[in-house]
Image (cartoon, rainbow, N blue to C red):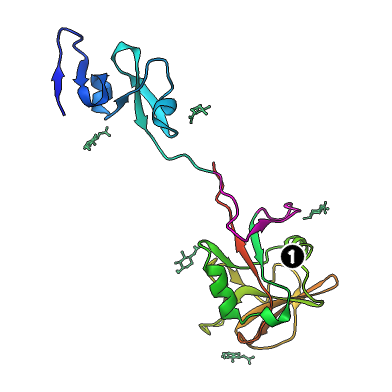
Amino acid sequence: MMKCCCLIVFIFCTFDVSNGGVLSRMCHASNGTCGGKGVPCNDTFGSGWLSNGLCCNDRPCCKFLKAPCVPETCPKGFKLLSNQTSSANCYYSSPADPATWNTWNTAEDHCASTDGAYLWRPNTEQEAIAIKNEVNYPSPMRLWTGANDIDNDGIFTFALENGSLSFNDLPFGIVGAPRNESCVMIINVVALWGWTKEPCTNVYPYICEYKLRVCP
Ligand SMILES: *[C@@H]1O[C@H](CO)[C@@H](O)[C@H](O)[C@H]1NC(C)=O
Ligand SMILES: *[C@@H]1O[C@H](CO)[C@@H](O)[C@H](O)[C@H]1NC(C)=O
Ligand SMILES: *[C@@H]1O[C@H](CO)[C@@H](O)[C@H](O)[C@H]1NC(C)=O
Ligand SMILES: *[C@@H]1O[C@H](CO)[C@@H](O)[C@H](O)[C@H]1NC(C)=O
Ligand SMILES: *[C@@H]1O[C@H](CO)[C@@H](O)[C@H](O)[C@H]1NC(C)=O
């Protein structure tokens, strides 16, 4: 890179031939790049570039500040609820045909195969109702949740999402059949929701959940 300070032009200017612009000292010191005269930096260099002072000849001194937050859409196979009052997350629902139902581990693996997705964490009854309205599983509807105590420490946590589930303080609904197994299924009978500890090898349909990243 050929640079020279040119006293004749301006004391404050430094030639930077590679950018074709005349850097001011401040722009040079900040590792900036000269943009086009009268043109916003992002138009010249793309989004994330902002004006950060001036170059000589009234050109903006441009710097790449940060990658913009790009609003996300749901991953392939996932969709938003039609009623998003209770949750703005994306959901995948496994097929309704009992022949396709899966063990907890297979369900969890399938959810985790989408980066950032996890086996459902039911948070509110409204969310559960909104999901019920989207799916077509046989009644009573039984679904795997991500909650499990596969490590047998007595504490139920949601796989990948890592939140905990206490059977003494359920987010909604009641404790279902009093079993002492490691994987948590949620059952819906009319307006009633029950949580039960089931053998992980049982097969049920399941919901995968994905939280969209929100731009500030
Ligand atoms: C400019 O770049 C140099 C070398 O890459 C770096 O050491 C210096 O901290 C940078 N200065 C600023 C203000 O970013
Ligand atoms: C440049 O930034 C302005 C305001 O920040 C924005 O309205 C415009 O869409 C941006 N242009 C590009 C090409 O990103
Ligand atoms: C959407 O869900 C909320 C509760 O989460 C409920 O109050 C509202 O009535 C629902 N809207 C429709 C159109 O079903
Ligand atoms: C959950 O915990 C695992 C293991 O500690 C970690 O790798 C993962 O990033 C955590 N997930 C979230 C959403 O915090
Ligand atoms: C439930 O299972 C755990 C682990 O297998 C065992 O430690 C615990 O005593 C059992 N509790 C009941 C009430 O059977």
Q: Looking at numbered disc 1 in the image, what kind of residue is underneath it?
A: Ala
Residue that appears at 54% across and 82% down: 150
Q: Residues within 10 Å of mark 1 (few under 14, many from 20)?
A: some
Question: In this rendering, does residue 16 appear at all?
Answer: yes
User: On screen, 119 above or below 213?
Assistant: below
Q: In the image, is 190 to the left or to the right of 165?
A: right
Residue 72: x and y, percent?
Answer: 56, 48
Q: Residue furthest top?
A: 8
Local secondary structure at mark 1: helix
* Residue at numbered disc 1: 128
Residue that appears at 72% across and 62% down: 124
User: On screen, 44 above or below 189?
Assistant: above
| The residue stretch that appears in magenta | 71-88
Q: Quadrant of residue 202?
A: bottom right
Residue 106: x and y, percent?
Answer: 57, 78
* Mark 1 C-beta closer than 8 Å to ligand 3: no
Q: Quadrant of residue 121?
A: bottom right
Question: In this rendering, does residue 155 appear at all?
Answer: no
Q: Quadrant of residue 149?
A: bottom right
**How would you classify the magenta stretch by its main secondary structure?**
loop
Residue that appears at 60% across and 75% down: 107
